[in-house]
Image: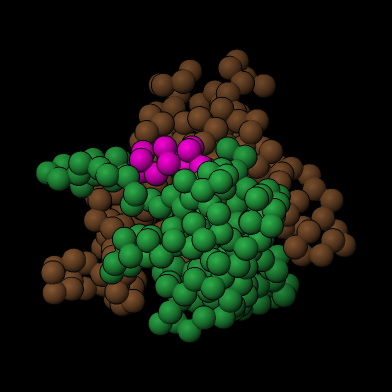
Chain colours: A green, B brown
Amino acid sequence: MNGTGKRIYLAGPEVFLSDPYEAGRRKCELCGRYGFIGVYPLDNPLALDGLPPREQGKLISAANEASLRTCHLVIANMTPFRGPSADAGTAYEMGFARALGLPVFAYSNCAEPFTARTAASACGGRDVSGVLRDNAGMLIEQFDMTDNLMLDGGVLAGGGTVIIRDIAEAMRFTDLSAFEECLSRMKEKYL
Amino acid sequence: MNGTGKRIYLAGPEVFLSDPYEAGRRKCELCGRYGFIGVYPLDNPLALDGLPPREQGKLISAANEASLRTCHLVIANMTPFRGPSADAGTAYEMGFARALGLPVFAYSNCAEPFTARTAASACGGRDVSGVLRDNAGMLIEQFDMTDNLMLDGGVLAGGGTVIIRDIAEAMRFTDLSAFEECLSRMKEKYL
């Protein structure tokens, strides 16, 4: 336990990495170095063996929600995941934290703007009115944000920041320089 | 105003349709038919003209969060959007609602299971241990759910249901039969 005991929930798709525990250890170690306690989704010891997949999923979900409720702050990894947006579970947890009043800081290891990468991935183009739309005719957001405006909006409204780094694809889900910058900003603000 | 006045926040990517207001009118009209009041993100009259894009985005985000706080229930359109998962803003709002204690019902107009469509979109395959991974080596969830376990888990934990329909792609974001089934279930449970 450090001096302050402020707990940071670590939201992000690291749980899907080939060694998700090592990813959590690295993040928690950095949290400690900045005077915080990192809380990683896989910290919860759950008895999942032998349960049907859906029951396992429900237990993990409940444990993550319970963990979030024990935390004071969140750092969310918004790096685009399997599409132009952040991991859906991360987006869910950002909203969850925001409704609880927890300040959320976020980072993305992809520097390509949201509008550009959405247009690229969904074959975007301008319609006759000049509005940017995807190949299904649906509007592409142009709010100069990192992701869907609810995600950026929630971070900013709670006093957080979105840190952006241009990291090569091979390191995109493991590089922690932007994560560390979040910790540095949070230390200034909350410790 | 109907007899009960229960307000349902209508989360989903309809706001990106070519006529997002018509999409909202149709959903709100159905809500009324089932005895509920539909609350659509674009209901809020906002003075956005002339503001920089980021300021517009922040105002819309704040208005949506404020709307959610006035609601009793949520119906989320989890139909996969620009990738294997739900729209990121919808995922955020589901988490937000869940943290507030609002029951969330959800639907998807895509019947292909989450695991299969993630594997298809991210070139998934089994590693030497038989674990299903995407082309970046990241785990593909196999919890027999509609989307990331946080989304399904939040719906189920709050007593909600995820309704799934197999709708042709051209109608995927406009067909409201699954939405109406959510209303029917909610009427049984809450009215």
From what the image shows, is residue A142 above or below residue A38?
below
Say whether residue B79 is left or right of residue B36.
left
Q: Would residue A119 be counted in the magenta stretch?
A: no
Q: Position of residue B118 (x, y in %)?
A: 32, 65
**Start and end of the magenta stretch?**
A61-71
Q: Which of the two residues, A61 or A121, is positioned nearer the viewer here? A: A61
Q: Would residue A64 be counted in the magenta stretch?
A: yes
Q: Where is residue A109 in the image (x, y as percent from the top left)?
A: 53, 74
Q: Residue furthest right?
A: B50
Q: Which of the two residues, A148 or A74, is positioned nearer the viewer here? A: A74
Residue at the spot x=67%, y=21% of the render?
B1
Residue A109 shows in this picture: yes
Q: Which of the two residues, A108 or A137, is positioned nearer the viewer here? A: A108
Q: Where is residue A164 in the image (x, y as percent from the top left)?
A: 61, 72
Say whether residue B84 is left or right of residue B77.
left
Q: Which of the two residues, B140 or B164, is positioned nearer the viewer here? A: B140
Toward which corner of the image does residue A49 lie, by quadrant?
top left
Residue B29 shows in this picture: no
Residue at the spot x=39%, y=44% of the render?
A64
Residue at the spot x=24%, y=50% of the render?
B144
From what the image shows, is residue B157 above or below residue A76?
above
Residue at the spot x=13%, y=74% of the render?
B128
Q: Where is residue B25 in the image (x, y as percent from the top left)?
A: 63, 42
